[in-house]
Amino acid sequence: MSLSNETHHDWQIATIADRWQESGEAIGLRLQLENKPPHLAGQHLDVRLTGEDGYQAVRAYSIASADDGSMFFDLGVQVLEGGEVSGYLGSYAKPGMQLEIKLAGSHYFTWHPEDPTPTMLLGGGSGIVPLVAMWRTHQQAATPAPMRVLYSVRQPESLMYAALWDDPNTFLSFTNVAPEGWTGYRRIFDAEMLHETVGESKQFFICGPTPFVEAVSSKLVEVGYAPESIKTERFGPTGPRKP
């Protein structure tokens, strides 16, 4: 992989400052960027790889960090089998490596600290990443607006951001295998679980695989929440380069 010589004003060169194993299936990357632009909780970065033959692959990865005024972005990257960019990052990303990145411009799926609306964040799998940025921004801002998180994960090895789930306003459900001694939820989200966890929430951010997002959105509407109170972001796997 080589860096492109293109000078498009939106693309910038970031340096990997740190890399860690976030779960059995995902890595965390801390990117350092001189003149880093401010970002909103929920935004993502486009990461572009350019091959020696000029072939380019671009994938979007959600930012997991709150904007604290530093020059760093934290990303959560689920490493997919056959994934062009995630596979490369999973195998080769290391501190000191440079990547081409671009901050996405959309503000639709973003949470703002000045928003007084009680909010619920519902994530499935690696869809928790932009919601973690919202949660961290909420904690950093110390806003009185209530926020809760409900996270669906298949098994302990898939759990991301494990240190965050001790807060009484965060909830976990293991849908396949639960940790030994686990006394919490062990099923997909249903009306009963939503009733027990949403509290006074009036708006909802849902992120995860398309089937998860559609099912949870439908369930929220079914139990009485207005469609306009629900914002969604969904994703699906991408395949390898075609010949």
Image (cartoon, rainbow, N blue to C red):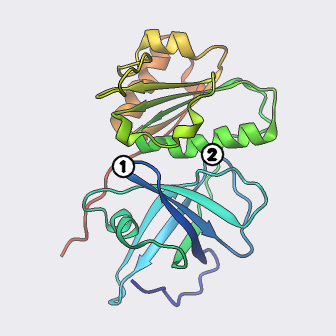
Q: Residues within 10 Å of mark 2 (few under 14, many from 20)?
A: many
Q: In terms of sequence position, does the residue under pointer 2 or pointer 1 come before the other?
A: 1
Residue on which the image places disc 2: 133
The answer to the question of whether label 2 and label 1 lie on touching residues, with beta carbons closer than 8 A, is: no
Residue 166 percent location from the top left of the image: 59, 28
Residue on which the image places disc 1: 24
- Quarter of the picture containing the C terminus is bottom left
Using the image, determine if residue 97 lies above or below residue 229: below
Residue projecting furthest to the left: 243
Q: Secondary structure at mark 1?
A: loop
* Kind of residue at badge 2: Ala
- Quarter of the picture containing the N terminus is bottom left
- Residue at image point 34% right, 26% down: 178
Count of all numbered marks drawn on residues in the image: 2
Q: Quadrant of residue 141?
A: top right
Horizontal side of residue 69 vs 111, given as left or right: right
Is residue 224 visible in the rendered image? The answer is no
Distance between mark 2 and mark 1 Cα atoms: 21 Å
* Kind of residue at badge 1: Gly
Residue projecting furthest to the front: 181
Horizontal side of residue 183 vs 34, given as left or right: left
* Foreground of the two, 36 or 19: 19
Residue 215 percent location from the top left of the image: 38, 26
- Residue at image point 39% right, 73% down: 92
Is residue 180 visible in the rendered image? The answer is yes
Using the image, determine if residue 231 lies above or below residue 148: below
Task: Tell me the tag on residue 39.
Answer: none
